[in-house]
Amino acid sequence: MGKQIDLLQGTLDMLILKAVSLGPLHGYGVLLRIQQISGEQLEIQQGSLYPALYRLEHQGWIASEWGESDNKRKAKFYSLTATGRRQLHSETEKWNRMASLIASILRTTSEQI
Amino acid sequence: MNLLARFRSWLKSIVKGQRLESEMETEVRFHIESYAADLVRKGLSQEKAMRQARIEFGGIESHKDAMRASLGVRWWGELGSDMRYGLRLLRKNPGFTAVAILTLALGVGANTAIFSIVNAVLVRSLPFRDPDRLVRIFFNNPGVGLRDVPFSVPELEDLRNRAGVFEDVSAVGGGSVNLTGAEQPERLEFVVTHPNYFSMLGETPQIGRLFGPQDFALGFAPAAVISDSLWRRSYGADPNVLGRSVRLDNDPYTIIGVLPPGFRHPGPTISGNVEVFLTAGFSADPAPNPPARSTRFMPAAIGRLKPGITLEQAQARLTAMAIQIRHDFATDYPAQAQWTIEIQPLQEALVGNVRPMLLVLLGAVILIAFIVSLNIANLLLARASGRQQEMAVRLALGATRERMIRQMLTESMLLSVIGGVAGVMTAVGTLGFILRFVPSNIPRLSEVRIDWVVLAFALLISILTGLVFGLAPALHSAKVAFSSAIREGGRASGYSIKTGRLRDVLIVSELAFAVMLMVGAGLLLRTLRDLLQENPGFNPTHVVTANVWLPIPNNPKADPYIGILYKTAFNRELLRRMEAIPGIELAATTSDLPTTNLSVNDAQAIDALAIEDRPVESSLDLRAERIRISPDYFKVMQAPLARGRFFTEGDEDGKQPVAIIDETTARKYWATRDPLGRRVRFGQDPTKPWMTIVGIVKDIKSDGLDIDGVPHIYVSTYQSPNRELTVVLRTSLPAAVLNPQIRHEIQSIDPGLPVFNVASMNDVIDRSLASRRFSADLVGGFAGLALLLASIGIYGLLAYMVGQRSREIGIRMALGARRGDVLRLFLHKGVVLAGIGIVAGVVFSALTASMMASLLYGVHPHDPAVFLLVPLLLLAVAVLASYLPAQRATKVDPMLALREA
C-alpha cells in the first residue's frame, strides 16, 4: 500500500457522486468503492462520509432507499438523481478546467514569463 | 438548487425527528459492523475489530450532529435544547420563576380581561346589518344650552321626507310598563318605535315575526315582540307563545315574535335589558293628537343613512334643512333657541359616555404590563450578571454572539409565553367574576367574551413584554461576556458600569410608570372619597325606598287611576298603610328619588318654566326639574327647610296651587328679590293656574352626587299627581325585612301593581357611584401593585449591588469608612434613582392627567394634594426599600470580605 493522500477540500462530494453514479450503494459501499477506484490511495475519515451523504440528499442530488445488503442486513442505499447527474457533469468539467489550469501554471518556467 | 427538495427533506426531518434519529443510528451501526466484519476477515479478533472500526469511524455523536446540520435541522434542535435549558433554569430558580410568572400572569390577565371589555364595548361594530350607516339623531337648542331635546311628529316627517339622506328613520321611546297576568305583576322595560325599527336594524326573529308595515297604527299597535330572556323566564321558552295575549299597563297585546338571545336595543335604557318592544304611529292616544309641530314629546330617533352618503354630507344637509325649517315655521322655533339637527354614529352615541372610563382602565393595565416587564427585566439582568462566567465559557468554546442572544431570547420568550398562557387562563377563568363588578350601566356588556381579537391582543402583550424584558439582558450578556469575565475569575467582578446603567434606567422608568398609575388612582379615589363625603342634602341613613308604577293604559277607559282624585286617593291609602307597618315612623312619596333615574332621557326631564311678570319670550331659558312629592317628603328625608313652610295635607286639588323651590332655583331666578309669594307655572299654556312659592329648601343632590346646579321645583303630588312613585320610609328596619310587608300592603290596594327596587337609601346612593367605585378601585389596585413592584425593583437592585460590592465595602471600611458612610452611599443611590423616576413620572402625569378630567368631580386634574402625596409616598417606600439592603451593607465584615478577595 502506497502513501495515502489526504482528500482535497470540497472534493468528497464529487467523489461520492461519482461513486453512486456507477450504481446504488450503501454508505459503507461508497467508502469501499472510492478506496477501490482510487487504488487505496485516498484517506477518508469514515464518519465524515455521512454528513456529506446527508447534505447531498438534502440538496436533491442523490436519493436514498432502505434495502437489503449482501449479508442480508437492512441498509440505506444511495443512488444518483437526474439533477445529481447534471451536477456531477458540471463538477467534472469544472474540475478538469481547474486541474489543467493549475497544471499549466505549475509547468510554467522562467523563460515563458 | 432544488429548494423544494430541501424544504421537503427539512420538513420530513422535523416532523419525523424520532425516525431520523433511529435511521441515523441504524446506518452508522451498519457501517461500523460491516467494517468490523471485513477486519475480522483480515484476521482480527471480533473484539479488536469492533474497537478498530469505532476508532476509524470517529466521534459518532459529532458526526451525527454534522448530519443533522446537513439537513438544516440543527437550528430546530438548538431551539429545542435552548428551551430545555431554559426550562431547567426556570426549574432551578423556583422563587424567581414563581415571581416572574405570577406577575406576568397578572399583567397579561388584567390586560386580557380589560381589553375584552373594551373590545366588546368600543371596538366591535354593533351587531346589525351595515352598522356604519346607523345614526342617532339629536335635536338641539344650542342658543339656550339644551342638547337632545324632544321632537314632534311633523319634525320626524321632515327627517323622513324632506332631508333626503335617510333610508329609514324611527322614533324611539320607552320606559317602564307593568306586566300583569303572570304569577307576580312585573315591571318591565319597554321600547316603542315605528314599525320599521327592526327592518332598519336588519334584525330577524327567533320565532314568529317582527314588526312590518301591517302593524302600522296611529296609536299603539296591538302587537308585541318580546325578548329572549322574557320568553324563557315567563313562558318557559314555549314555542306556542305566539298569539298569546299579555296585559301591559292593562292594555291587551298579542305576542307576534321572539327576538334572538343576542339582541340588545341600541339606545339608552334604564336597566340595560329591554324586554318588550311595541310599535306606534305616535299620532293617537296616549300621544297628543292631532300632531302639531310644537308638540314635542318624542324623546329620540335613530336612522339609517342612504348608501353612499357620508356622515359629513348628511350632517351638512340636515343643518341646512334645520335653518330652512326655522325660517318656514318661525312661530314654532324661537329665534334665540337656534334649533338644529345633529347626527352621530349609533355606536358612538351608545358608548360615548363610557369611553373615557374604559380608556383610562385600558391605559392603567397597559402601564401595569410595562411595569411588570421592567421588573422582570431587572430580575433577569441581575441573573444575567450572575451568568457572566457561563457566557464567557460559551464564547470561549466557540459560540457565536448571535447564537447567545438567541439563547437568552429563547429563555425570556419561554417565560413570556408561559406567563401569557397563564394570564389568558386567568382572564378566561375570572372574566365572569370580574364582569359582576363592572357597573351595569356600561352598554353591550353581554357581548363581552374572549374572542380571536382579544387572544391576539393578549399574544401581542405577552410578546411585547417578553421582548422588553428579554432584549435588554440578552444584548447585555452577549456584550459583557465578550469582555473579561473569564479573566476576572471565579468571583464576579464589581458592579459593572454598563449593567449598572441599564438597570438604573429600568428602575427609573418603572418608578415613573408607577407614579403615573398612582396619580391616576389618587385622582379617582379622591373624587370617590369627596363624593362619599358629599352632603347629599338629606340624611340617607334609616331610609328604605321602594318603587311602584301606576299603569298608563292607552285606552282611558281601562285606567283606574285617571284624574287627580283617584291618584290622590291611592297615594293617601298607600301612605296610610305604610305608616301602619310596625317599625315605620313616617312615609312619603316622590316622583324622583335622589341619585336615581327612572326615565331614559334625563336631560328632557327638565321642564320649561314661566314666571309671573317675566317676559314670555325668555321662557326657553327658564327651566327647572319638577319633582312631585307628598307632604312629609322632606321630613322623611330630613332635608332642612331654609325659609317658608313644607307642604301640608291641605295642599290638594281645588286649593291654591303651591310650590317649594330649592336654593339653586332661588339664586338662579330671584337673585335680588325674595322668591316667597312669587308665582310660577310649568309649560307655556297661559290657561294653567299660577303656583305660589311657599317655601325654600336647602339643595338636595337629586340628580346624582356629582351633578350640581340643576334648579328644582317641588310641587304637591295632590295637586300635580304622577304615576312613577317612589315610596320613602323612615325606619330603623332593614329593607330586606320590610320588603314582603311593603309588597303585601301595596298589593292589597291593587294586586296588579308591581313593587320593585326595595332598598335602603344608602344602597341606592352607593349604586349610583358603582361606575366610579369600579374604576377607582381597579386603578387603585393597579397602583398598589405598581408600588409593590417598584419597591421590589429598588430593593432588588440595591441588594444585588451590596452583594456585588461587598469586597469594595470591606476595603472602604478597612480604610476607615464608618458604617454611616456606607449606609449613606447606598441610601443615596436608591434615593437618587427614586428621585429621577418620580420627577419623570410627575412630569408625564401632569402632561396626561387632563385626559382624565371627565372622570373627575370636584378634583382638579393637577390636584396639588395628589401630586404632592404620591411622590412623598413613593419616596418613603423607596427609602425604606433602599434602607434594608443598605443596612445589610454596613454589616459587611471587612476582614471576611478582604480574605475572600
Image (cartoon, helix red, strand yellow):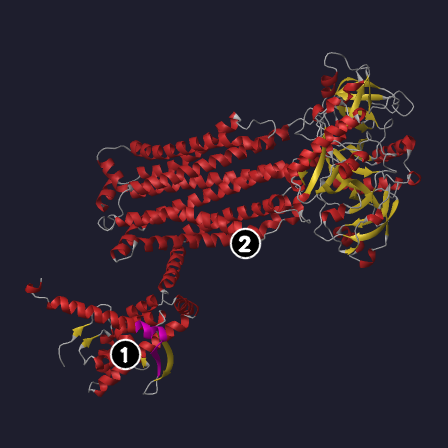
Is the residue B383 above or below the residue A61 in the image? above
Residue B341 placement, left or right of A74:
right
Q: Is residue A78 magenta?
A: yes
Quadrant assignment, res B885: top left
Residue B553 pos. (x, y %):
88, 40
Decide: few, some or many residues near mark 2? Use Cα within 10 Å; few <14, some 14-19, many ≥20.
Answer: some
Dot 1 falls on a residue whose secondary structure is helix
Residue B749 is one of the magenta-drawn residues: no
Quadrant of the rendering where the C terminus of chain A is positioned: bottom left
Q: Residue at x 80, y 49 (%)?
A: B211
Query: What's under tag 2, amino acid-wise?
Result: Met
Residue B4 to residue B485: above or below: below
Residue B714 appearing in the image: yes
Looking at the image, which residue sits at the far left?
A: A111
- Which of the numbered marks, if any, corresponds to residue B425? 2
Q: Which numbered disc, 1 or 2, marks the residue closer to the eye?
A: 1
Range covered by the magenta-colored residues: A74-88
Identity of the residue furthest to the front in this view: A112
Callout 1 crowding tier (Cα within 10 Å): few <14, some 14–19, many ≥20: many
Q: Nearer the viewer, residue B653 or B736?
A: B653
Q: Amino acid at mark 1?
A: Ala
Which residue is the site of mark 1?
A: A19
For mark 1, name the chain.
A
The chain carrying label 2 is B
